Amino acid sequence: MDKPIEIAVIVAGIDEEYQNGVIDGIRHCAKMNNANISCFCAFGGVLANSKFDVGEYNIYSLINYSKFDGVILMTNTISSPVDKEKIIAKVKSTGLPVTILDCDKHPEFYNISIDNYTAMQAIVRHVIEKHNVKRLNYISGPMENPEAAERMRAFRETIAEYSIPYEYERVFVGEFRAADGKNAVDAFLSSGLQRPQAIICANDAMALAAVEELGNFGYKIPDDMIVTGFDNTYNARHHLPALTTVSRPLDDAGFKACEILIGLIIGREYPKNTVLNASPVFSESCGCVSVEETDISEYRVSAYKLLNSCRRDVSLLNRMTTELADTQDSASTIHTVSKIINEIKFDRFCLCLCSNWDQVVSNGLNIDPTDTSSYQIHGYTPKMLAPLILENNINDPVSMFDSADMYPAPLKNGGNVSFFVPLHFGERCLGYYIFTNSKFPTKSLLCHALMLTISNSIENIRKLVHLKSMVKELDKLYVIDPLCNIYNRNGFIRNADPMFKRTKASKQKLLISFIDMDGLKHINDCYGHNEGDFALQRLAGVISDCCNGGRICARFGGDEFIILGENACEEDIMALETVFEAQLKNINTIVKKPYTIAASIGTIVSEIQDNVTLFNLITQADEIMYANKKRKRTSRYLRHEESEEEIQYESSGNDQA
C-alpha cells in the first residue's frame, strides 16, 4: 500500500461558517484521495487580548514542514498581519507546493479564489438601481485581508459609476467580527451625517449585528434602511428578515484547493489562478423576496438539531468545568478530561504537554509563577508528553515523543483529518490537542470554550505545583540553617520532639551531644567574618557526618550545635566523641587554614524519667560541654606558662655560654 499524501492546512477560526465550508470541501477531497490532512488551527483575534493571541498563534510554530508533501493556506482567516507574514515566509522557504484561498499576492502559490468583486458589484448595483438608493454606508473587513480589499474596491468603483461620492465618514473598517456591525451602526448614527438609506456589509456576521443594533434604535429593516451581507451563512438565511447576501461555493473552493494540491504533488500542472463564481441572493433585508425560500419544515428540523447539539455541548462543558474544579493534581485532571471527552465523537483524541509545563524554577524564595523567563512562550519543547491518547475509549499514553513528529503516535492509514488546537494560558504555552476524524472542532459552537476550560484547569494544576514548591521552600527556610545547611533551632524542635516521645514510650535511652565552637571570635577578629562562616560550615559538616543511625543535628545558636539520637547506650558516648575529634583533625588537615577549627563537646546518654524534659537533658549535656571547655582552657593556660618558663631558662643558659 502506497504511503498516504500528507497535507498541512493553516487556518484560524475554524468554528466560523466560511472556514467550515472550505474545510468540508478539503475533508471530502482528502478522503477520496486517501490523503491525510493536518489542520493547524488558532482562535486568534477573538478576545482582544494580545497575550491570548500569542498563545493561540503559537500553534503554527509546531508545524514540521519536512513531514508534509504540500500546504493549503487559509491565511485570509488570520487577523494578525505579523503572524500571517511569518507563516507565508516560512512556507515559501520550504519549496513545497502550496494552494492558497482567496489571495493572489504570491505568484509562487496556486490561488483558488471566489469572485468577490463581481458579486459585491451586483449587490451594490441592485440596491442602487432596484431600490433607488443614493446614500450608502459601508462596513468593511480589515484592509490587509485580500477578500475585504476586493469587496471594498467593488463598492467604491460601483458607486462611482452612479456618481455617488465616496465619503470616509460613511465607511467603517472592522475585523469581520459581529461586534464590528454594532460598533459601525453606533458610529454612523452619531456621525451627524444624514441617515444612510442602505448599509452594505462585507460579511453576514457584521450585517446581522448591524440589523440588531438598528432595531435597538427603533429602525425597521428594510422599511427604514436596507442592510446587505456577504457569505449566505446559515444565520443569514434563517434570520427575520432574511438577509440579502452573496452565496459563495465554499465547499467547492476547499475541494478544488485540495484537488489541485494533490495533483501538483504527483506532478500535474495547473494554472496559477482558479476563480469560482459567487452569486447574489436578493432577499427580505433589501425588500425583495428570496427566489429560494427555505422550506419551513426543513428549517424546523435544522433548528432543532442545532439547539439539541448546543444543549448537549453546554451540558458537557458544565460537567467538565464542575469536575475539573475539584481536581488537585495532573493525574485526576487527565482522568476527568478522559472521562468527559469520550462523549465526543472522534477516532482519536490526544492531549500533548510540553515537557516543562509544570517545571518549578526555584532560587531561594524567588519562585514566581508569573515570571516569563521560567516558561515556554514561543515554540514547543523538543520533547513532549502525551498523558492522554484516547482511541476506542482506551487511553494509551506516550511518556515522551519528539515535538518534531507532531503526532505522539503515527496514524495507521490515510484519509484522516486531524485538527491541532493550541493548549495555553495567556501567552504561556502548555501544549496542544489533536482531534482526529471529528466534526466537533468545526461544528460545535463550544469547542473553543471546552478547550479553554481544560487549559485553565491544567494551568491551575501548574500553579498548585508551584505553590507546593514555594511552601516547601518556605518550610525549608524555617527549619534549615542557611549557612550550615543543617537544622536550625526550629527544625531541631520539630524533629526532636517526636524522637523524645518515642524514646520515652519505649523506655530506651536518648543520646544528646552539645557542641560549642572554640575560638570563633578570634577567627572573626583576625581573619574576617567570611573565614568565621567558613569555619562554622566545616564544623557543621563534621557534626553532620557524625549523625548516622537516625541521629539528627542542628545549629542551636551562633556557635552552638546539638546532636540527638535514640536507642542509645553508654558506649555511644566514647564512640561519638572519638569520631568527632578524628573528623575535626581530618578537616583541619584538609583545609590548611592559619587557624584551627576546634570545638568542645559534652555528651550524655540517659533514660527519660517522667519529670524530665528534653531541655533538662540538653542542659545536662551543655554543662558537661562547658566543663570540658573549661578544662581545655586551663590546660592551654598551664601549657602556655610552662612554655614561657622553658624559654626563660634556655635564654639564661645561652647568655652564660
Image (tube, rainbow, N blue to C red):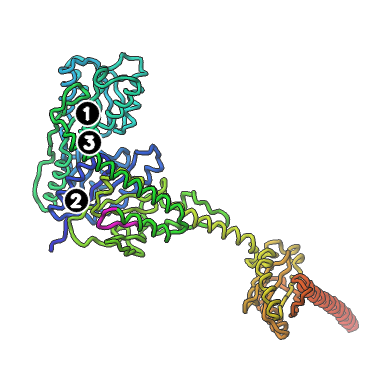
Query: Do residues under tags 2 and 1 come within 8 Å of each other at their CB atoms?
Result: no
Q: Quadrant of the C terminus?
A: bottom right
Choose between 311 and 507: the one closer to the eye.
Answer: 311
Q: Amino acid at mark 2?
A: Gly
The reply, left or right, for residue 261 in relation to residue 220 is left
The answer to which image quadrant residue 401 occupies is: bottom left
Which residue has dot 2 on it?
70
Magenta stretch, residue numbers: 344-351
The answer to which image quadrant residue 1 occupies is: bottom left
Query: Do residues under tags 3 and 2 come within 8 Å of each other at their CB atoms?
Result: no
Q: Amino acid at mark 1?
A: Ala
The answer to which of marks 2 and 1 sits earlier in the sequence is 2
Picture coordinates of residue 283, whole percent (x, y): 18, 26
Please tell me which residue is depicted at 67% across the width and 62% down the height of the picture: 530
From this view, report whether residue 540 is shown above or below residue 166. below
Disc on res. 234? 3
Spatial CA distance of label 1 from label 3 is 10 Å
From this view, report whether residue 496 is shown above or below residue 82. below
Foreground label between 2 and 1: 1
Residue 345 lies within the magenta run: yes
Which residue has dot 1 on it?
242
For numbered disc 1, what is the local secondary structure? loop
